[in-house]
């Protein structure tokens, strides 16, 4: 096992990793930009190193500074958290070349899953259901016949796209070629690559993702799903486990498919395979080769500490669990609390004057803020996650309403008032929503 882990991240996820390491008897090194000198993750870790000025490209994305920080502190592993360098294959390679363990999968697996066309091809080969569509890039000359084969509406997507950008829905063949050329031009200017591919457009899907956990000894297991359909501009806002749309058979069926696929791939670490789900069918969209923001809902209903397992498997140990140990008990919901105006979603950095996190039975808060802390304007606006558990979904929602009312963050604007309204909506209470629900709701109310 590692003596010392450097955490190449900030905020609540850096705290999450420090906590797991401390329980495991591993020393921790925090890194920070000059803007984060007073951040809680810096105070919590055993040691800290300043790695650069505020801009992320000069600090949290500064690979030479991170490697140097590891060398001067004698850390033997790097945990990348999520975001920043967590899915950067080149970073994983450089870390490994310096005889430091990258706590994550191999650079090769990161690279495959980072390329949308390659990821889809690999998923299909491994037996994971994918959205019907073109086999890779679509040329203008073959576009009409490919679209006819898929059936309208179709979706044109940029191979190098990301963040849900550069997609075009085409409802009939008269529009296809003009939309194809538009998509190519946009892809070229946004991503420097005009390669596009085509998929069947799903009109009212849910976003359901499967959590996997794998070691270097050929063991791969799944920890069920999370439903992350409540999104705004493709950003998740509220996540829950289990999904209100799946029963135990469906859960174990898709979970087994994904775990078997990961075993075949030789994947190591934690990972999430994301699907769109419509009319009882799963369609692969992408795989995230890292820990996710919403991992606590899975931890809450399975009792598994994902970061503990992630660190263990990275050090070469065997999984401490087998599939039948994974039981799904009760229900958990996570709310992402952002420092944003709850009406306009514009960022609201500033100083927190008073802070009172919710507590009590079934409540977990993962956050790195405190009263007196100034949220810097340079980074993501996520300031905390409220995760609530109940034996049933009803109990969970009831407790969630109580916890949201109790939560106080003064001095800045947060998305808490949005949640106060949201979790009383009949569709949310009924679990009746798809990936478009939240945007329609926000459009209606403003
Ligand atoms: P990106 O990498 O740009 O985020 P994804 O393939 O993950 O692209 O898709 C982003 C989002 O676009 C999905 O979460 C979903 O909301 C929507 N989307 C993607 N593919 C389809 C599809 N075939 N039909 C309908 N919506 C889709």
Image (cartoon, rainbow, N blue to C red):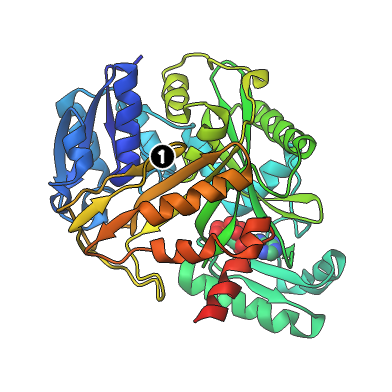
Count of numbered tags? 1
Q: Nearer the viewer, residue 170 or 345?
A: 345
Left or right for 49, reference 338: left
User: Percent position (x, y) of residue 311?
Assistant: 41, 24
Image: 122 above or below 312: below
Query: What secondary structure is marked by label 1?
Result: strand
Q: Which residue is identified by label 1?
A: 364
Image: 355 above or below 349: above
- Say which residue appears at 20% left-offset and 55% top-offset: 354
Image: 426 above or below 406: below
- Say which residue appears at 56% left-offset and 50% top-offset: 397
User: Percent position (x, y) of residue 1?
Assistant: 36, 14
User: Percent position (x, y) of residue 302?
Assistant: 57, 29
Q: Quadrant of residue 71?
A: top left
Q: Is residue 443 visible?
A: yes
Q: Residues within 10 Å of mark 1 (few under 14, many from 20)?
A: many
- Say which residue appears at 48% left-offset and 38% top-offset: 296
> In the image, ligand 1 is in what quadrant?
bottom right
Q: Nearer the viewer, residue 90 or 407?
A: 407
Q: Nearer the viewer, residue 426 or 349?
A: 426
Left or right for 116, reference 80: right
Q: Is residue 68 visible?
A: no
Q: Nearer the viewer, residue 191 or 226?
A: 226
Q: Quadrant of residue 63?
A: top left
Left or right for 70, reference 172: left
User: Percent position (x, y) of residue 188?
Assistant: 51, 71
- Say which residue appears at 36% left-offset and 52% top-offset: 406
């Amino acid at each position: 096992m590692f003596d010392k882990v450097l955490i190449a991240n900030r905020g609540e996820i850096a705290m999450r990793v420090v906590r797991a390491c401390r329980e495991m008897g591993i020393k921790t090194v925090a890194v920070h930009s000059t803007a984060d000198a007073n951040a809680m993750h810096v105070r919590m870790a055993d040691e800290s190193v300043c790695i650069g000025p505020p801009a992320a490209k000069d600090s949290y994305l500064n690979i030479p500074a991170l490697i140097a920080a590891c060398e001067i502190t004698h850390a033997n592993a790097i945990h990348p958290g999520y975001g920043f360098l967590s899915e950067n294959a080149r970073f994983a390679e450089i870390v490994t070349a310096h005889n430091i363990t990258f706590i994550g999968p191999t650079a090769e697996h990161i690279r495959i899953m980072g390329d949308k066309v390659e990821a889809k091809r690999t998923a299909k080969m491994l037996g994971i259901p994918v959205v019907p569509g073109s086999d890779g890039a679509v040329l203008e000359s073959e576009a009409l016949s490919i679209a006819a084969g898929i059936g309208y509406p179709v979706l044109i997507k940029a191979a190098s796209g990301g963040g849900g950008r550069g997609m075009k829905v085409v409802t009939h063949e008269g529009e296809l070629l003009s939309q194809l050329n538009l998509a190519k031009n946009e892809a070229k200017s946004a991503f420097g690559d005009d390669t596009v591919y085509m998929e069947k457009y799903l009109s009212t899907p849910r976003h359901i993702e499967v959590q996997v956990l794998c070691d270097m000894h050929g063991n791969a297991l799944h920890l069920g799903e999370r439903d992350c359909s409540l999104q705004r501009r493709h950003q998740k806002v509220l996540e829950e486990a289990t999904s209100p749309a799946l029963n135990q058979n469906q859960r174990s069926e898709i979970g087994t498919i994904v775990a078997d696929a990961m075993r075949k791939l030789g994947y190591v670490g934690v990972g999430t395979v994301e699907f769109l789900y419509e009319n009882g069918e799963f369609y692969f969209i992408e795989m995230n080769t890292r820990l996710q923001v919403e991992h606590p809902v899975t931890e809450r209903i399975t009792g598994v500490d994902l970061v503990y397992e992630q660190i263990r498997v990275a050090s070469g140990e065997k999984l401490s669990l087998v599939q039948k140990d994974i039981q799904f008990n009760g229900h958990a919901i996570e709310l992402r609390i952002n420092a944003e105006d709850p009406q306009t979603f514009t960022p609201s950095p500033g100083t927190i004057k008073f802070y009172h996190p919710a507590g009590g039975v079934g409540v977990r808060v993962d956050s790195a803020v405190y009263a007196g802390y100034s949220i810097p304007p340079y980074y993501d606006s996520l300031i905390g996650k409220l995760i609530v558990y109940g034996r049933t979904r009803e109990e969970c929602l009831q407790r969630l309403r109580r916890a949201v009312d109790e939560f106080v963050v003064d001095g800045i604007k947060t998305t808490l008032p949005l949640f106060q309204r949201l979790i009383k909506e009949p569709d949310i209470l009924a679990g009746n929503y798809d990936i478009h629900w939240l945007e329609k709701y926000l459009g209606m109310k403003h």
